[in-house]
Image: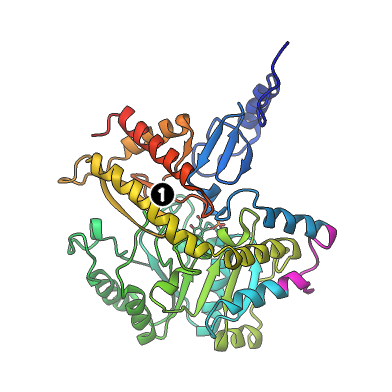
Amino acid sequence: MTADPAPGAIPEPELARLKRQAKDHILFYGRELSDTLITKASGARLTDETGREIIDFASGQMCSTLGHGHPAILEAIRAACDDAIHIDSTKLSPPVIELAAELAALLPPNLQKSLFLSTGGESNEAAIRLAKLHTGRFEIASLANSWHGTTAGAQSSTYSSGRRGYGPAMPGSYALPPPYAYRCPVRHCQGRCDMTCLDIGFEMFDQWSTGAGAAVIVEPVQSAGGIIVPPDGWLKKLRALCAARGMLVIYDEAQTGLGRLGLNFGFEHEGVPPDMMTLSKTLGAGVPLSALVTGGAIAQSARERKFSFYTSHANDPMPARVGLAVVRTLVGEQLAARAREMGAYLRAGIDGLAQRYEVLGDVRGRGMLIGLEFVHDRQGKKPNTELVERATKRAFELGLVVNRPGGAAHCWRIAPPLTIDRADIDAAIEIMDRALGECGAR
Ligand SMILES: Cc1ncc(COP(=O)(O)O)c(C=O)c1O
């Protein structure tokens, strides 16, 4: 008698067929794809083709802050099936209005109007277009380690990846140095950013600019750029530098929004709201949903100048229902507070690893978003990309997904679902420890 296959396991020859079809029919689109198929995702765990469980320290693609398959999300999807999944883009539905209103209730008076779209790149594209329309200018600055998406405007403001091979970026795209204290981009600070980089960035911007500065787009913490946490006062200073030039500030809260940093929104850390905010990843909890949020004179411009960002899925009801469930769960389960509490626990475990391994040159982050930078030795600080590569692979074999940020291949980005429990955090730290040891980390 043969034993029942483990839940999620794919029997042969189906598994071999799927892998063959993947080779033949899936187009390359970014990075090498894992050879392992994932068949289930629940809570903070994935199940692979063999039925093996894997702890997910990446929250999917940084979207599943509520954990995979959260009952509120499943219920929202079911309810949408009973009501409406998609309608034409000139119509509104109750979930869209409720989501806009419940988001607005969490936000300051200048961020009260939302447009719901599908992806993060799309919401940034919309923000950039509206900034241009509102200011009548076209220059957009972002940080040199940024990642804002792969649509043309968002990609033009993305410096950490994907620039070569596609011809010119949007005219007027400009890169500012990031507040990366561990490797100061202007070779000035040692370990603590004093914001000289920001002054220099804007001095150079003024020389480069044709006087048409429209906006700056930044994340409150640069995630794909290597979990770069700006020093206190950086957002305030950025805001002042932009105001002096008549430029808008756009915060891309794709990863930082909705609890991950221990606050509802990343900008709350300094209490400096932007002119426009984009949400994506965490808003849809795995379902494609993003938002451009703004208000006041900018919303007025959108109305009067007939802002055009009309997509097939603008303000669709099904993803909005999911977004509404996310916002309600964030508030109802006090997930931001949980991110602070569990983030401190996680950080203690990671600091413990950094005490044992010289190759872990820097640990940084906020709440449940933590970056670990790998070096050959702490004196020389040479990035140790090769070790991260091996340790990532070994950790996966041992049962942990830990990913490398898109623009910082020598780092680990640690970002489990906010709902993860202590036992899974302990197990994951143990796996990291073992993977590092087995890969020869000192
Ligand atoms: C900060 C940030 N903004 C925008 C994006 C793009 O989002 P999407 O991949 O949904 O287009 C990403 C994706 O990683 C991101 O990290």
The quarter of the picture where residue 201 lies is bottom left
Q: Residue at x 36, y 75 (%)?
A: 235
Residue 135, given in percent of the width and then of the height, sits at 50, 84
- The residue where tag 1 is placed is 413
Q: State the predominant SS element of the stretch in magenta.
A: loop
- Name above or below for residue 294 compared with residue 81: below
Residue 150, given in percent of the width and then of the height, sits at 53, 56
**In front here: 238 or 64?**
64
Q: Which residue is drawn at 38% across and 80% down?
A: 239
- Is 296 covered by the magenta stretch? no
- Name above or below for residue 274 compared with residue 389: below
Q: Which colour scheme is used?
A: rainbow
Would residue 262 be found to the left or right of residue 81 on screen? left
Question: What is the three-letter code of the residue carrying label 1?
Answer: Arg
Note whether residue 224 is visible: no
Residue at the right extreme of this rendering: 82
Residue 265, given in percent of the width and then of the height, sits at 49, 69
Q: What element carries label 1?
A: strand
Residue at the top extreme of this rendering: 1
Residue 347, given in percent of the width and then of the height, sits at 36, 52
The quadrant of the picture occupied by the N terminus is top right
Note whether residue 297 is visible: yes
Q: What range of the chain is rendered magenta?
A: 82-96
- Name above or below for residue 223 compared with residue 214: above
Would residue 108 be found to the left or right of residue 97 on screen? left
The quadrant of the picture occupied by the C terminus is top left
Residue at the left extreme of this rendering: 379
